[in-house]
Structure formats: C-alpha cells, structure tokens
Amino acid sequence: MKKFVVILLLAVMGYYISAIFFDIGFGNSHLVEGISPVKDAYLEETVNTLSVANTVTSIVVNFRGFDTLGEVTVLFLAVTALGSILYKKRHQAGDRSVLFSASKIVTSGSKLLFPAIVLLGAYVFIHGHLSPGGGFQGGVIIATGFLLMLLAYENFTVGHNALSVIESLAGITFAGVGMWGLIYGGSFLENFLPVGTLNDLFSGGVIPIIYIAVGFKVAAELTGVIYTVLHEKG
Amino acid sequence: MIYFILIIVLFLLMIGAAVYSIRQKDLLYATIATGIISLVLSVLFYLLQAPDVALTEAAIGVALTTIIFIITIRNTVRYEDESDNKEKFKSGVK
Amino acid sequence: MEDTLFKLLDYGIYGTAVLVILVGLYGALVKRSLLKIVISLSVIDSGINLLLVAIGYLKGGTAPIFSPGYLENPKVMVDPIPQALVLTAIVIGFGVTAVALSLVIRLYRHHHTLHIDEIKNLKW
C-alpha cells in the first residue's frame, strides 16, 4: 500500500518537473530570448583581461574564487569528521581490516604504473589553465595512484604526519595568496602578477599558483580518507 | 545518425543500471551498478562538450566511491535482509 | 528528419535525468536498510548533475576552451557557468557520501543491525 502511494506521488512530481524542462528546450539559447549577458562577459574577459585559455578554470579560480575557498573548506571538514567518527585508540592503529595477498601480476604491475599515474596527475593540475583539467582532477588522479599501491602491497604506508603537513601548507598558500591580493590590490583573491599571452605556461597571474595549491591539498586529503577507511578494523 | 543510436543506448543503460542498483538485494552488485551509472554519466558529459566535468566524474565516481562502498560492505552486512547473511555466507559463497 | 531526431534527444536527455532522480527518491523513501539508502543518495546526485550540465548545452556548440588556432575561425561555445557549478557539486557529493558511510559503520558497530526499524534509541 505504501509503495503504491509513493509511486503515485513521484509520478505526479515527475510530470510537473519534466513539463518545465521540456518547455525550456534543449540546445536553445537560454531562458531569455537571444542574449545571455553573463556568459558573453565571462567568455570575453577570459581572453582579453586574464589570458587564460580554459574558461571553466578562470570562472572557478578567479571570477568565483571565493566559492572555491568554501568548497575546499567543506572538503576539509568532511575529512575531519570522517577521521573523528572512525576514531580508535593509538595502540590499535596499524592493522588493516582487509587482508588479502595480491597476485604476482598486480604487485609487479602496480610498481610500474604508480610513477606514471602520479606524473599524469601532476601534469593535469599544472596545465589546468591551458587544457581540460585543474586542481581537483589532478588531485583525485594522484589519490587513485596511492589507492592502487595500498591495495597491492600489505605493508605500504604513507606517513600520516607528512600528509597533514602537506595539506596544511597548501591551505595556507591558498589563503595567503588571497590575503596578499587584498593588501596589494584592494580585493580578496585579486590578480597581482602580470598576465602573459594566451596559451603560454606562465600566463594568468596567480591562477596556476592557486590551482597547484588546490591540487596538493585535494591529493593529500583524499589519500588520508582512503588510508583511514582501509585501516578500519570491525 | 550513428550518434543518435549511441546516445539512446547510453540513456537506456543508465536507467537500467539505476533500477538494478535499487532493486538488487546483494549489496555488492548494487555498488557495481552505481559505478556503471558514473561511467555512463562521464561519457554523456563528454558528448555534451564538458571535458573538465567528465574528468572529475570519471575519477571520483568510478574509483573512489566504489572503494569506499566496498570497504563499508566488508565491515557491515552484505545482504539487504540480514537473515540471508548467515545462510549464504556459510554455504561456501565467500 | 534531423529536427525530429533532435526533438527525440530533447525528450530523452531531460526524461533520463528526471527518471534517475525519481528512481533514487523511491529508493530513499521505501527501502529499509541503511546502506541501500546511502546508495540511493548517490544515485540522486548523479541525476542532478546530468540535469544541470544538460541545461547549458547550445546547439552545434563546442567546449569553452580557447585552444591555439581557435581565434581564426570562431564557433559558438557552450555555457561554461553550469560546468563550474557541477565541478563543485561532484566533489561535495563525494564528501557527503564518505561521511554518511562512516556513520553507517559506527552505527553497525553499536547496534549490530542495519535495519532502520530496530535502531530506536537516540544515544550511541
């Protein structure tokens, strides 16, 4: 009986929501006849004022940079909450909950793959302003590399202190660059380095510096999450 | 023309994986179906001309979410109705 | 012919996204096991992200990246603002899933069951 009522309510809700979206249409220019001024302003200012080739990077770091600071904070809070909920005493730390011995192919193959994955992750977050990529993507790729090594070898450890130090330093760099922009320019996260030409590695002012800091921070955080969850003994 | 057939097949795969992951009683299969949803979503993001979003969804949705779910299943129950847990585990399905 | 195919795509993509959200909502409302509810939340996240990126598509558009050689023959670009929003939403969705799963592990250790009808006390 309850399932029938739920399906009925969801069908009514789905009908009204899809009516709105079919009315908007797919692939039209949007919601207002003809012109969307914010999109045109962002696309033009990215090339002329900032000289950054990737528009999504310039929106995430420069035009809406404060929201990225909020997102990094939320991710930090989530990792801290996870670490404090799965808390256990000091002398129990060190034994793993999943005990399997991986086969020969996995152990020898992951030794070859791990430097390549870390190199790919570093390339993605360094060239975030020139090609698709950026801090979050590169950090997650590096965390996947560490996950591969943690699953293949039983006694592979990552120093917990080293991860905390890297994460804190990266966060301080992000906030420090913003404060320097406030002192020097007049608004938080303002661009104070000279912008170069388009499609150059050293273009865009502070945008590569902020994205490199975000890449390190996300990589260290997600590696810490994987490490905490794997060492959980039930 | 071939693109339209490909996109329709991707839509059907996504809806099928979503329904399968909700209705399946073995939780390990439901987790793999969630990974399939994320994979199809990443391909759809690429076809909608959004490469940054496709990279992020492929890395986070397929790799990290699946491993966290699997470790949780290892530490808690495996089947949805827990009365199945004792019979099926003891009969050799390890 | 091309117009009818594009109309089918229009109904298809919005219909798929709304259908995935509704399937996830059904799972979150009806199912009794805590782990199944967390899986349903993850499915809802995927549906919402698809809906947001699908709004920003322009017909015949290309990715919003000024690669070298673009400025000679410019084409229409898709909207980059929903993509920046969805980038944040994916990462935060993963964070919420991770915290929810840690709560599930902790609850199982205390009550030894994941059935939500039997977890009644409010204290740990």
Image: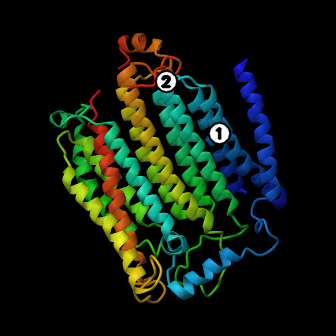
Q: Is residue A76 left or right of residue C46?
A: left
Question: Badge 1: how crowded within 10 Å, few (<14), some, or many (20+)?
Answer: some
Residue at x-position 58% and y-position 63%: C83
Q: Are marks 1 and 2 in contact (CB under 8 Å)?
A: no
Name the quadrant of the N terminus of chain A.
top right
> Disc 1 versus disc 2: distance between alpha carbons?
19 Å
Residue at x-position 71% and y-position 67%: C58
Q: Amino acid at mark 2?
A: Asp
Q: Secondary structure at mark 1?
A: helix
Indicate the chain on which mark 2 is placed. Answer: B
Name the quadrant of the C terminus of chain A.
top left
Which numbered disc covers residue A129?
none
Nearer to me, A151 or A107: A151
Q: Which residue is mark 2?
A: B26
Instruction: Name above or below for residue A124 compared with residue B84.
Output: below
| Residue A65 makes an appearance in the image | yes
Give the quadrant of residue B19: top right
Q: Is residue A19 left or right of residue A36?
A: right
Nearer to me, A190 or B1: A190
Instruction: Name above or below for residue B51 compared with residue A112.
Output: below
